[in-house]
Image (tube, rainbow, N blue to C red):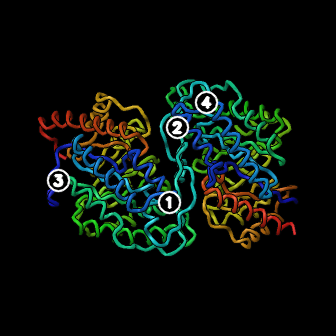
Amino acid sequence: MQKLGLDLPLLPTTSVGSFPKPPSLARARTDYAKGKITAAALQAEEEKATAFWMEAQEQIGLDVLVDGEQYRGDMVVYFAEHMPGFEIGDLVRSYGNRYYHKPILTGEVRWPGPITVAWWKFAQRCTAKPVKGMLTGPYTVMDWSFNEHYPDRKSACLALAREIRKEVEALLEAGAKIIQIDEPATSVRPEELPLVVEAMQVVTEGLPGYFITHICYGAFRRIYPAMLEIPVDNFDLEMANNQLSLLDLFREHRFRKDISFGVVDVHSHVVEDRATVEQRLEQALQVLQPEQVWVDPDCGLKTRSVEEAQEKLRVVVEAARRLREQYANRSAPAR
Amino acid sequence: MRLLTASTGSYPRIGKTPDLQLLRQTIAQWESGKKTEADLKAAEDALTRAAIAEQVDAGLDLVTDGQIRWYDPISHLAGKLENVSINGLLRFFDTNFYFRQPVVRGPVRWTRAVLRAEYELARAASPKPVKPVLTGAITLARHSIVEYPPYQKDFRQLVLDYNEAVAQEVRELAAAGASVIQIDEPSILQDPSSIRLLEETLQALASSKGAARLALHVYFGDPAPVLERLLASPADIVSLDFTYNPGLVERVAAARPAKALGLGLLDGRNTKLEDPGGVLRALDRILPQTRAEECYLQPSSGLEYLPRDRALEKLKRLVAIRNQVRN
């Protein structure tokens, strides 16, 4: 991190990516879909919402910020909407009463020029703290799309990796130092983990950034510790939702990279109290070294209300600060 | 040999038009206290009727209720059993669909019929026979968090207790007149060492089925390693997902099955419509080798993994292919 000019505190706090859209933006998106407002009017609302979340993150005291993805509907669909080679399908269910427009690969995929860079710049202008560049990884884009074009999953995934690398290069050129490449689909087919590794290699190899990947809601037992071969610096993992059961795996095989440790459940309306979150973090620190731990929610917060999301972020920051004070006063054990 | 067309399980519960958005809107309003339980049930009924109508209009011989009321394949039944509560989300196999995990904190006990009323409503709404679908005991158990020590030491007992609940559901459905009852056991393909346990559970279900026939359906994996055992199991119909192993067609043909087969030759998880020639070649290999009186051509899995328009196209393609066989 220091090589990149970043000076973060012990137990840096961050969030996984998405935040809920304020009601005014939700209305604007509906109006835009119905043709009632222009694209420029929608973008103005998206910028207003992004600025709101940048200020909220500053006020709450997070250390590494995100743009909150106010301009995205879904993490895969957003990129599919921008990249030639995709069509956007009708709705399919994600869970419960949640649905998304699943993309369809119908042609050769192509990077059309910077997709997220303007938003990253907009967000970074709002703060002196580092803002993560946020991308969805090639394996997840492939897995969460229908494929009517490529002969197999591997060729679709590697074609996407070559194009997504160009977006990473564009973010780095714009000044981003921390780039998160989400691969929540990583654990779906354990036998394809080598493909996830190969694709991430294509995306990140030789590039000067601190890379994070977010993986969630999967069968980690089937891919750990082999998943540590994915060439990133930090794994952002949901821990609260599975009652910290992954710590048992880390006891068996040392977690040898940095981790963004999810300490609040994003699919519950209940905001955890500080003692609960501190306890989760203390349990983490019984297994992990404080120097390798970042602290965040389990996953993106977009399904919560604006108030719930802020409260969940606040308790993350409060708990991390308490533990940070405690651990700063101790001599760090050798890593 | 008759080749019938069948639905495999779920069907999309949303679509483009306002009437097909009704359930999503009603659930959201029910969650915020603006709609009643009766409103929710009415919306579920409406979308169930729509799912049945599309399957019937597509020309299927055997339909399902689309599992429209199911939050997911696991918690719908497990969550209504005694000593089972529902926890956080987990990915369902290699899909990007998520289910809520059951937490077992005591002996699993069935207390009331879950599917019978759903089946009766669907049957009343359908001019074609309706096949109720149940998730099997091994799949329920493999997807549960077990916090009850006796089960932690004895997985088999957990499976058998879940199976008793499934058996009660089978009794209720058979009593209500279901002629085919589908038991989904995708977990057996991830866990083939449990094949003996699967046979045991199916034996118990077979003694509960009355006049109904049991259709075992395995999917989201290659059934080849356990194929012969599945074909010899106490199920009346064995239904397979052909999308994971291109060599499965030859394996099935070589096994010369005596049982009715469910042939999941159309990919329930990809929008790409199958080339009829490829499916017909597979049917030409399998059907002459099958000694049963009938088989079913069907999607490899439930169809709610597809957008509604593509799900309907898939069913129409399926029926068109079957009609070529018939001609």
Q: Which residue is mark 4?
A: B36
Chain bearing tag 1 is A
Task: Work out how far the residue at label 3 is from the one at label 4, CA to CA, in angstroms.
Answer: 49 Å
* Front one among B67 and A250: B67
* Pointers 1 and 3 within a single chain: yes
Q: Earlier in the sequence, mark 1 or mark 3?
A: 1
Q: Give the quarter of the image for residue B5.
A: bottom right
Query: Which of A48 and A4 lies nearest the eye of the viewer?
Result: A48
Residue under label 1: A35
Residues at marks 2 and 3, CA–CA distance in whole angstroms: 42 Å
Distance from disc 2 to disc 1, alpha carbons, whole Å, reads 41 Å
Residue indicated by mark 2: B101
Which is closer to the viewer, label 2 or label 4?
4
Q: Residues within 10 Å of mark 3 (few under 14, many from 20)?
A: few
The mark closer to the camera, 4 or 1, is 1
Mark closer to the observer (2, 1): 1
Circle 3 residue: A128
- Residue B259 x, y percent position in the rendering: 81, 52
Residue at the spot 32% in from the left edge and 34% down from the top edge: A280
Residue A106 horizontal/vertical position (percent): 55, 71
Quadrant where the image shows the N terminus of chain A: bottom left
Rendered view: B149 above or below B7: above
